[in-house]
Image (cartoon, coloured by chain):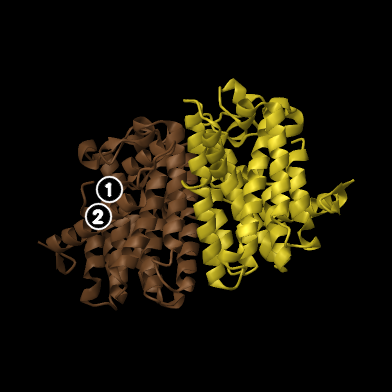
Chain colours: A brown, B yellow
Amino acid sequence: MRAGGISRDTLQHAAAEIAQAIDAAFDQLLPLPADARLRLYEAMRHATIGGGKRMRPLLVYATGNLFNVSFDSLVRVGLAVECIHVYSLVHDDLPAMDDDDLRRGKATVHKAFDEATAILTGDCLHDLAFEVLVDPLTYADPFVRCDLVRALAVSSGPSGMAGGQMMDLEASKSGFDIQSVTRLQQLKTGALIGFCVEAGAILGRVPPEGRGSLRGYAHDIGLAFQIADDLLDVEGNAELAGKAVGKDAAAGKETFVSLLGVERAREQASMLVDQAKAHLRSYGAEADLLRAIADYVVERDR
Amino acid sequence: MRAGGISRDTLQHAAAEIAQAIDAAFDQLLPLPADARLRLYEAMRHATIGGGKRMRPLLVYATGNLFNVSFDSLVRVGLAVECIHVYSLVHDDLPAMDDDDLRRGKATVHKAFDEATAILTGDCLHDLAFEVLVDPLTYADPFVRCDLVRALAVSSGPSGMAGGQMMDLEASKSGFDIQSVTRLQQLKTGALIGFCVEAGAILGRVPPEGRGSLRGYAHDIGLAFQIADDLLDVEGNAELAGKAVGKDAAAGKETFVSLLGVERAREQASMLVDQAKAHLRSYGAEADLLRAIADYVVERDR
């Protein structure tokens, strides 16, 4: 079976390599301390090690490969973005937010530990993202590191991921139309996915005016990813997903699927994947991994 | 009345100037958006504008003045550190943490809004700190900006402020001795106070090996500040403090005052202030504001 010019095996091999590198990096980042912070570090390890698709680090890696960026730099940036992603999951799972008990097939942090520890676990991973990113080990040139820090802060803050989560909370209060849901998801999941691709280009010394097609790619797979998520929430299997499903409908939330219907949502996702791959037309075989990720985004079952 | 070589009026004048500049900077940073994030921005404005002693920005300013750093740079770094300080207050006030209803004389964010909004308000201020810091407007040289980002991430994360808050949560579970309480407070409040002074030196292009006396100063006023806080918690006035008092004893938490008693705690704070000022002996009148801040730290009534 072929996906976007490379075999499914090649995609799985790259994903497994990145997942292993990210697990090893978290293990090194979070040694257990011999003081009263032990529980905090245990909770951070519980949240970060051995779980998740690591799709965001894989995107950083796949984009950086277009520009021959070193593996070590890409893993460090992938680690930083995964710190942000996991912190957001830990906070979003809290009872005051989405109130989830299950995440990546394990108890959520506030269930396995407690709410206060979960809040601090998220806060600490949030800091560690910037600490990892700004380290000279990530990249020698401080202009590049500053550019990465700026891009990550913008994509995860009120104009990005956290702003999108606020919109999501408001969405259950009042009816959102398709434009509002699109904007919400561009902030909530799209902004951080956009960072991953942008980071690969920043590390590759691509000037901002040369990042247009990669931004287009990220925009399209970000929306396709969210539509696929909404479809999995309707049709998916909690065991495979490693988290609760059917939550959006239960919460009365408008989603791409509730607004478009299953069939049109599926068509829309497929169209976005084609469009994402079209953005890569100026690249050759070196972009096959990005093409395969685009296909995977809608074909996945979790 | 004289405090550390300058009049109390001069200290108050500098503090008022900084407080006004920080309020104006928050006002500019947080324009209300015309979308579903409105509530989030209202909550961030509620938490940040028009409250607090702004002691941390004042420390950045007073240290930067030793090295003729521009006012605009110092205010931007002060804004960043205040973003971190306020985010930590908003999260620490949550029911799952310290469960406080009153802060800076106003309802805490989760009381004035709700818990989910409070969590996101803290998360967003956390990002904005790094976004403000890394901007070229803060300082042109990216080496300096990277140094600031690194120092802020370390001082606010698991090896600093958030790690100290975790220790504080554990402290109510089991008896802490004076060494443990000192270490807890060095992380919980000392690390960020240390950042303020370090940031002034970073902006002043002082190499790490030349920052020893300033680090000593920050260490000593950080502990003195916390002892004064513990004394205010025992003896203070909730109306003046703008927050609940008597909480430590009620929670069965060990503090400097519970371990040393009121008299010895007061002596210890006074000794630390003398020691802090002794660290400044190589500086002349240009360090008078830092000396006055050291005195103020233990003389304040809120």
The answer to the question of whether label 1 and label 2 lie on touching residues, with beta carbons closer than 8 A, is yes
Which of the labelled discs sits on residue A19, or is there none? 2
- Image point (67%, 65%), residue name: B73
- Image point (78%, 39%), residue name: B299
Distance CA(mark 1)–CA(mark 2): 8 Å
Mark 2 packing: few (<14 Cα in 10 Å), some, or many (20+)? Answer: many
Q: Is residue B5 visible?
A: yes
**Which residue is tagged 1?**
A52
Residue B103 percent coordinates (x, y): 66, 35
Going from the N terminus, do you reach mark 1 or mark 2 first?
2
Q: Is residue A162 left or right of residue A290?
A: right
Q: What's under tag 1, amino acid-wise?
A: Gly
Q: Taking B257 as reference, is A235 above or below it?
A: below
Q: Taking A210 as reference, is B54 above or below it?
A: above
Q: Is residue B81 visible?
A: no
Q: Quadrant of the C terminus of chain B?
A: top right
- Image point (73%, 58%), residue name: B281
Q: Secondary structure at mark 1?
A: loop
Q: Secondary structure at mark 2?
A: helix
Chain letter for mark 2: A
Chain letter for mark 1: A
Q: Is residue A192 left or right of residue B226?
A: left
In the image shown, does B111 or B36 lie closer to the viewer?
B111
Q: What's under tag 2, amino acid-wise?
A: Ala
Residue A65 percent coordinates (x, y): 28, 71
Q: Are marks 1 and 2 on the same chain?
A: yes
